[in-house]
Amino acid sequence: MEFRGKIIVKLKNSIKDVRGITIEDAVKSNFGSNFKVRTGTYYEFSFEAENKLQAEEKVQRITEELLCNPITEISEILWEK
């Protein structure tokens, strides 16, 4: 079976998001808007697995071991139907 989805990794709310602050300042100075920004990283994936449980375990492991630093970041996995 083919599985597809997205992984979103972003900084924990308690971590200062320097890139987000920079973008926020640029929006405020160029558009005069009170705009809040938090940045993150977005990954798309597709792969073959025997079943949904195997697919979920694989993506969770990849996320935890390679994509997300659990000390400073949180992740979310979104599956396509």
Image (cartoon, grey):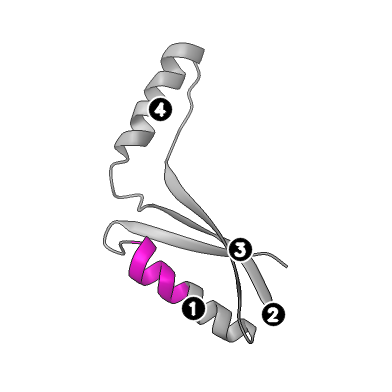
Look at the image and give the residue range highlighted in magenta. Answer: 60-68
Residue situated furthest front in the rendering: 48
- Residue visible at 34% across and 27% down in the picture: 22
For the residue marked with disc 1, what is the amino acid?
A: Lys
Q: Name the residue beneath numbered marker 3.
A: 5
Residue 1's place in the image compared with 78, above or below, is: below
Q: Secondary structure at mark 3?
A: strand
For the residue marked with disc 2, what is the amino acid?
A: Met
Residue 34 placement (x, y as % from top left): 48, 23
- Please tell me the numbered disc located at residue 23: 4
For the residue marked with disc 3, what is the amino acid?
A: Gly
CA separation in Å, label 4 and label 1: 34 Å
Which quarter of the image is occupied by the C terminus?
bottom right
Locate residue 21: give its quadrant. Answer: top left
- Residue visible at 68% across and 64% down in the picture: 80
Q: Name the residue beneath numbered marker 1.
A: 58
Residue 40's place in the image compared with 65, above or below, is: above
